[in-house]
Amino acid sequence: MSAPIVKAEGLARFYDVKEGFLSKTQTVRALAGVDFELSPGKTLAIVGESGCGKSTLARLITMIEEPSAGRLTLDGTEVRPDTWASLRETVQIVFQDPYGSLNPRQKIGTILMEPLVINRPQMPASEREASAREMMDLVGLRSEHFDRYPHMFSGGQRQRISIARALMLNPKILVLDEPVSALDVSIQSQILNLLVELQDRLGLAYLFISHDLSVVKHFADDVIVMYLGRAVEKASKQTLFAAPRHPYSKALLSTTPRADPEAKKDRIKLEGELPSPLNVPPGCAFAPRCWLATDTCRAAMPPMEGETGHQVACYHPL
């Protein structure tokens, strides 16, 4: 088994916020200590409700923001302010919105060559153009698209352009922040199949951020379920979908639509509201909504325990 290309240990990100001019500063623990490893050629999915810390984790992996605590290693090098520049080409991101992530005033060729202009200024212009045209062909775009503007393309084509831009620097890691959620269902499958082909050809590692569990089931190798900034369950895709052990994971999976209209539906409806990230309850954050919660759950945070292939943070696992 190859060495992990991404390794996170206790990765955390906190934000200080104030509700008003005279109010006290409060701390939002957007990410409160996450551990995981990701190997080349593999896809790790991060799932959970809005506000669980998925996108915050993406910003830390791509070095858009600096961790408040913990340790992050990319391709064997620890991420620190003095190593950011050397690691920029190692990891790239594909954003959720293909309409908002492209500059409407630039032609596609200019958009694709821009990473090379910034990071490899010594490269001749002819080589930059040749590289951009080659990348367009790789993602299924035609040569005549080179001189067109983003508004002239469909959503699926724009996401192909975004993927091509992310690959221009030959990264080893791609962070996919809900890359198909803004697309039609028929186009989603095309983009996912393209990503699978690129991973097989280039050996890329994917960190796949998503709230669509049906897509995760098709696309991922391993899954981390998050709740209010913490990982509550880690498992392979097959293990998690077959036998989730955390009550929150069970409830989350019960919302996944099924193609069989006659299949038994066992929908779990969670009671109560998601706690405020400014006032996370003590103990297990899921306890106020959990039907298995006891005083132990409300008193102390459960540790992540279990076998290497399936770990759960719960005092009463299913």
Image: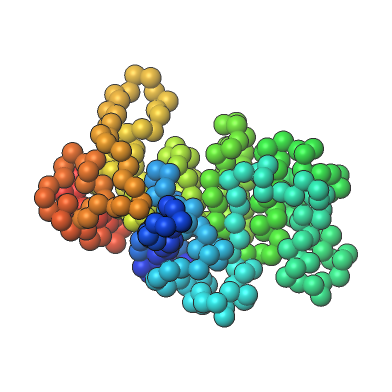
Please tell me in which quadrant of the rendered image residue 185 appears.
top right
What percent of the width, then of the height, locates residue 220? 46, 49
User: Picture coordinates of residue 307 (x, y %)?
Assistant: 25, 60
- When the figure is inspected, residue 13 is found, relative to residue 86, above or below; the finding is above
Q: Residue furthest left?
A: 295
The residue at 71%/49% (across/down) is 102
Viewer-nearest residue: 71 or 139: 71
Q: In front: 95, or 264?
A: 95
Q: Is residue 301 above or below residue 187?
A: below
* Residue 180 versus residue 95 in the image, above or below: above
Q: Is residue 148 above or below residue 112?
A: above
In which quadrant of the rendered view does residue 82 lie? bottom right
* Colouring method of the image: rainbow
In the rendering, at what x and y percent does residue 153 appear?
76, 38
Instruction: Using the rendered image of the protein, determine whether residue 222 is visible from the camera's viewpoint.
Output: no
Q: Residue at x 84, y 44 (%)?
A: 148
Residue farthest toward the bottom in the current orientation of the protein: 82
Pick the quarter of the image with the N terminus.
Answer: bottom left
Instruction: Using the image as rendered, state which of residue 87 and residue 103 is in the foreground.
Output: 103
Q: Which quarter of the rendering shows the C terminus?
A: top left
Task: Give x and y (percent) for residue 110.
Answer: 81, 55
Give the mark count. Answer: 0
Q: Residue at x 34, y 56 (%)?
A: 230
Residue 122 in sight: yes
Looking at the image, which residue is at 55% across and 56% down? 175
